[in-house]
Amino acid sequence: MQTQFDANKAEAFGERLLTALNDGALCLMTSIGHRTGLFDTMAEMPAASPAEIAQAANLRERYVREWLGAMTVARVVEHDPQTRSYRLPPEHAACLTRAAAPNNLAAFGQYIPLLGTVEDDIVACFRDGGGVPYERFTRFHEVMAEDSGQSVLPALRDHILPLAPGLIERLERGIAVLDVGCGRGKALNLMAGWFPNSRFVGYDLSEEAMAYARREAAERGLGNVTFAARDLSDFDRTAEPGRFDLVTTFDAIHDQARPLAVVTGIRRSLATDGVYLAQDINGSTHVHGNLDHPMGTLLYTVSCMHCMTVSLAQGGDGLGAMWGREQALDLFQRAGFGTVEVHELPHDIQNCYYVCRP
């Protein structure tokens, strides 16, 4: 039976896609504004000409002028045609500058151009299967470190670690800690500085990320932290039983080739009174449960073009970022954890936090 064509619905959808095209372009310009420091510069300036803004930001005026055009028609920057000046309203700067972290949404804008660099590879995967390996994502660890720097690092001591009562006191006395999928080691180096009596180990698949983490640890004079590039696909068999009192993962499990093996290894590596603290994407396993998710489209896109595909590139399960709470809880229980608590933090709309105990 042929359904009647709804012209109004078609027109509304066309307008929706036109808005999406403009917003996609805005994401590119937002990323540039963040990376060049234009938002930070304009937030500290009164209304100014393109030349004045370019000089203050140490950038080329012609490019700044064109960028300001995009920002003006997107209603991000205010323009006075009489004085030919441009101004970033403080209400907009409140979610566009580094000073606004953890509310700096401009940092997330970087994911759009970053993912665009592998579009050809992803299209090929749609046709041929397989995945796109980590090394194709040239800036991913840099952007993820900045993302984590907004959501995890400022909240780590006062909000995240206290989710496990008594944990900070144990860290102060001295325990063994492992961070799995630690990336550039920002969280681990921070904890190593706070808790000199504890010993810290970081594992990540990327040697580039490990080299960065080691350099930062050396610059800070941290002698209680080590980093190793390691494939944890067989961690369920190679983990040292009872070695660690605390294991953390920050936005890492859904990227793994074999997440059950990794989490089973984490369970195996924990002492009997140990704690596993996991941050991961806050969403539902079921698509219909994410219809009202404030970042749903972005997260499914990041999943398709990074999280899922890097796992598939290793012949892995390809869970993807939107694997959801239901699947996460099932995974933790299958790995052998006796109790699992789920927490949300007011500053972090993207993630939830699991406190798992043997």
Image: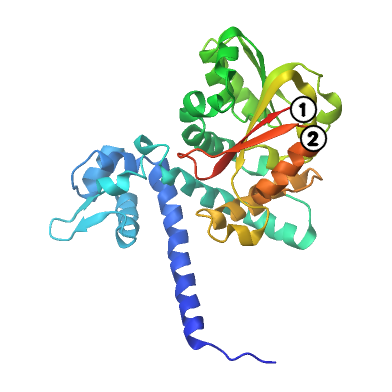
Task: Give the camera-side residue of 238 and 35.
Answer: 238
Residue type at mark 1? Arg
78 versus 9 height, above or below: above
Q: Position of residue 220 (x, y in %)?
A: 51, 13
Label pair 2/1, CB-CB below 8 angstroms: yes
Q: Mark 1 falls on what kind of element?
A: helix
Where's the C terminus, which quadrant? top right
Q: Which mark is residue 297?
A: none
327 versus 353 height, above or below: below
Residue type at mark 2? Ala
Task: Give the camera-side residue of 313 and 239.
Answer: 239
Q: Mark 2 falls on what kind of element?
A: loop
Q: Residue at x 42, y 46 (%)?
A: 106
Q: Seen in the image, is 316 located left or right of residue 111?
A: right
- The residue wearing badge 2 is 335
Q: Residue at x 51, y 27 (%)?
A: 156
Check the image and name the residue furthest to the left: 82
Label 2 vs label 1: CA separation? 7 Å
